[in-house]
Amino acid sequence: MLRFDLHARQGQQRITLEPAALIVAGWTGRDEAALRHHIEELAAIGVPRPSSVPVFYRNSILNLTQAPVVEVLGPDTSGEVEPVIVAVEDQLCLTVGSDHTDRKAETQGIALSKQLCAKQLGHDLWALDDVVDHWDQLKLRSFVTIDGKRLAYQDGTLSGMRPPADLIARYGSALAPNTVMYCGTLAAIGGIRPATRFEMELEDPVLGRTLKHAYDINVLPVIT
């Protein structure tokens, strides 16, 4: 069960959601130059280029978590901040999440790598209708802790990503109730790399508010 606080123009509401489907959308950029940059960024670490753009990966709903710690197998994983659409009954909502991914497994298959790691979600929701008219102005950021230092890791606006209506239409249909869709990410500043802590935020400069979430990464040993 996922628990959220929905912050809408009409007030705040506590939401409990039992997810029915998890979709991770990839290669969602509408800026072709930025999209090519991210494709080449992953190709540099051996990740095959996508079969289609965008592409939609199905993941187990058991991967969804709001826990303060993610446990991963081995040192080759990393987070990536994303806007996340949550279908609450007949209403689409927005939160912030991290598509934490096993980068070593990603060189063998992207679908596999995404299934191997928990997918983090924030605790707060916005009504999508409240922000869709200024979607391009929303600011997405992440920070990582590496060797004890907090570093800026991703930073940009959503103007580089396909808007929700376009992305959902390309998926093929309206999102069914209790569906969670991760909507894509930004290139990493300085390249993709592991960290011990991942912080993320989605800022709405028009309405003056920010969604925030963070988690620590606990690396489990690989035993042969």
Image (cartoon, grey):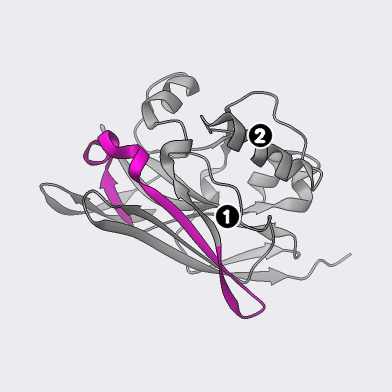
* Residue shown at 28% from the left, 38% from the top: 134
Q: Nearer the viewer, mark 2 or mark 1?
A: 2
Disc marking residue 118: 1
Asked whether 178 or 12 is in front, the reply is 12
Task: Inspect the magenta stretch and tell me whether residue 104 lies in it.
Answer: no
Q: Note whether 58 is above or below 137 in the view shown.
A: above
Magenta part of the chain = 124-152
Quarter holding the C terminus is: bottom right
Disc marking residue 55: none
What is the residue that sits farthest to the left in this orientation? 10
The answer to whether residue 88 is seen in the rendering is no
Q: CA distance from mark 2 to mark 1?
A: 26 Å
* Residue shown at 69% from the left, 37% from the top: 39
Q: Note whether 202 is above or below 131 in the view shown.
A: below
Badge 1 amino acid: Ala
The residue to which callout 2 is attached is: 36
Q: Note whether 86 is above or below 217 in the view shown.
A: above
